[in-house]
Image (cartoon, rainbow, N blue to C red):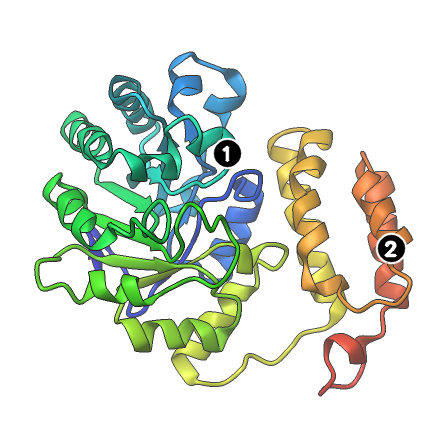
């Protein structure tokens, strides 16, 4: 599979761009564990062209992350063009436009999935950005605004005509937010539309290795993008890739091994930002990781972890969990290690 000049192996698996999740520390680990493509957190075009320091920091990445895309969002065509030019100077492998974010502060202002109500503006932005930069431009969007306006089959053709190199589809409408189940039938309809020539990347509710293979088998998508299913477990990509290749589950490692990976992720974020920001950025991972699921009387420990503001506070709490963890809960079919 190819996106413009970028070549990928059969059935590639991508890390989705996620606000306050896909910082450089997490991206590096997902890449190490097999993610074929990673993306920055989404970046406000308005903030980028105003030279906001925190926003400009988000376009920075390491060479070892390639291929990588920088994702931008906004509702003003001129601002999106200028933001894309700034991103191009950072030399990513591609620039991705976010037309899918459903949160009120984004969509309510006409950006993100708010564009599903103004597809003409969406196409105007897309065409102008494609013409303004030399890097490949891709789009990530949803099925429509609500159940009464699932316009994606026709819209996908229009976006392709604007010159994008690939299209990522999340299988929900904006009205659904992240509720209910992702509908991959319309993703399949776009993929199987004979007019569509660009790669179609499917996204939504891929939380198991079996589920990932099922999406490839049932829809024929060119790639699967994993978002929330990877939060707190960057090793999920290794498990998915192993299953896609062999049809077998990757043998589990020791609890301490997984714990050390999470600590490394936090450490990398701290080293590339600062201690407090690095820790704050990883709180969502600590809250979501399956590593701590099913631990009896864990509430107080979880609160302590999420309140820690320094590595000297946080790491001893995490180590204490490792000492007390019942390994048979996390690995019911394997002996404690």
Q: Residue 174, percent across and down?
A: 41, 45
Q: Residues within 10 Å of mark 2 (few under 14, many from 20)?
A: few
Q: Residue 17, percent across and down?
A: 45, 45
Query: Circle 1 sits in a helix, a strand or a loop, which is it?
Result: helix
**Rendered image: mark on residue 104:** 1
Q: Quadrant of residue 246?
A: bottom left
Q: Which quadrant holds the C terminus?
A: bottom right
Q: Is residue 285 visible?
A: yes
In the image, 274: left or right of 6? right
Whether residue 325 is situated above or below residue 268 in the rendered picture: below
Is tag 1's residue or tag 2's residue first in the polypeptide sequence?
1
Q: Nearer the viewer, mark 1 or mark 2?
A: 1
Q: Is residue 96 visible?
A: no
Q: Residue 89, percent across and down?
A: 30, 24
Q: Residues within 10 Å of mark 1 (few under 14, many from 20)?
A: some
Pick whichever, 66 or 244, lies toward us. Answer: 244
Q: Give the residue number, with chain letter if any, for mark 2.
A: 299
Q: Residue at x 13, y 57 (%)?
A: 196
Q: Residue 147, percent across and down?
A: 36, 53
In the image, 282: left or right of 85? right
Q: Quadrant of residue 71?
A: top left
């Amino acid at each position: 599979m190819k996106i413009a000049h970028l070549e990928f192996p059969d059935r590639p698996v991508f890390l989705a761009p996620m606000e306050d999740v896909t910082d450089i520390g997490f991206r590096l680990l997902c890449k190490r564990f097999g993610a074929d493509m990673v993306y920055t957190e989404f970046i406000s075009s308005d903030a980028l062209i105003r030279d906001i320091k925190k926003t400009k920091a988000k376009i920075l990445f390491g060479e070892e992350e390639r291929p990588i895309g920088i994702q931008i969002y906004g509702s003003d065509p001129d601002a999106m063009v200028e933001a894309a030019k700034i991103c191009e100077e950072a030399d990513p492998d591609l620039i991705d436009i976010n037309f899918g974010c459903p949160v009120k502060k984004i969509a309510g202002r006409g950006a993100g999935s708010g564009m599903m109500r103004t597809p003409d503006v969406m196409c105007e932005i897309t065409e102008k950005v494609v013409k303004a930069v030399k890097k490949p431009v891709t789009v990530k969007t949803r099925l429509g605004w609500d159940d009464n306006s699932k316009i994606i089959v026709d819209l996908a053709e229009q976006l392709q005509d604007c010159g994008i190199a690939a299209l990522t589809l999340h299988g929900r409408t904006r009205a659904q937010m992240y509720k209910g189940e992702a509908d991959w039938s319309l993703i399949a309809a776009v993929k199987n539309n004979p007019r569509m020539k660009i790669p179609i990347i499917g996204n939504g509710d891929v939380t198991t290795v079996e589920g990932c293979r099922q999406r490839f088998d049932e829809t024929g998508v060119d790639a699967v993008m994993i978002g929330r299913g990877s939060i707190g477990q960057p090793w999920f990509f290794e498990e998915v890739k192993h299953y896609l290749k062999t049809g077998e589950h990757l043998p589990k490692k020791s609890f301490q091994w997984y714990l050390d990976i999470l600590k490394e992720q936090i450490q990398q974020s701290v080293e590339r930002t600062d201690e407090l920001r690095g820790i704050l950025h990883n709180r969502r991972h600590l809250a979501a990781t399956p590593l701590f699921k099913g631990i009896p009387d864990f509430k107080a420990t979880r609160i302590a972890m999420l309140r820690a503001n320094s590595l000297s506070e946080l790491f001893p709490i995490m180590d204490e969990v490792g000492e007390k963890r019942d390994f048979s809960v996390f690995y019911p079919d394997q002996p404690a290690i």
